[in-house]
Amino acid sequence: MKCPVCGCENPDDYKFCHDCGNPLILNDLSNSDDFPSFDSKKLIVIGYIIAILFGWGSFILSSLFSSFGFIGFIGLFFPGFMLNSKDPKIRKHAYIQLAIMIIGIIVTFWVLFKH
């Protein structure tokens, strides 16, 4: 079966393109439980929680325990995931979350290496 989006050839039993991930049969998508649905508001709120915990949590951990606070870099994966969304609202919030995290990480390293 040929993907209607990217034109990649897929086996007939595939529901999604193995190259681009788009659904191969759009009519079956509404009846299928294989395609997860999510609430964009929940995704955005979770992103902000992760941005604050990992970006600024590393600052707090570094202040208390004099460690490098490398844990902040782990949190960059979630906003990075959100940047791949087709929804411009989610992408906008992902950029804001990245900024929150990067500022927190920069402040952490500035405080650590200032001493």
Image (spheres, grey):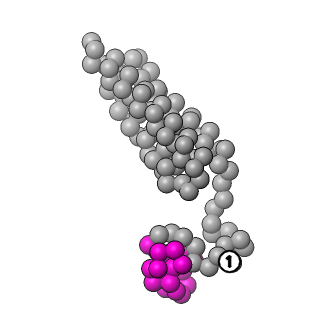
Image spot of residue 99 (x, y percent): 45, 33
**75 inside magenta stretch:** no
| Residue 67 shows in the view | no
Q: Is residue 46 above or below residue 58?
A: below
Q: Is residue 36 above or below residue 113?
A: below
Image spot of residue 75 (x, y percent): 45, 39
Q: Amino acid at mark 1?
A: Asp
**16 inside magenta stretch:** yes
Q: Could you tell me which residue is drawn at 44 percent across and 72 percent down?
A: 19
The crowd level at tag 1 (other Cα within 10 Å; few <14, some 14-19, many 20+) is few
Query: Which SS class for mark 1?
Result: helix
The magenta-colored residue range is 1-19
Image spot of residue 90 (x, y percent): 58, 47
Circle 1 residue: 28
Image spot of residue 8 (x, y percent): 44, 79
| Residue 110 shows in the view | yes
Q: Could you tell me which residue is drawn at 43 percent across and 41 percent down?
A: 76
Instruction: State the predominant SS element of the stretch in magenta.
Output: loop
Q: Could you tell me which residue is drawn at 37 percent across and 23 percent down?
A: 108
Q: Could you tell me which residue is drawn at 54 percent across and 43 percent down?
A: 92
Q: Residue furthest right?
A: 31
Which image quadrant for residue 42? top right
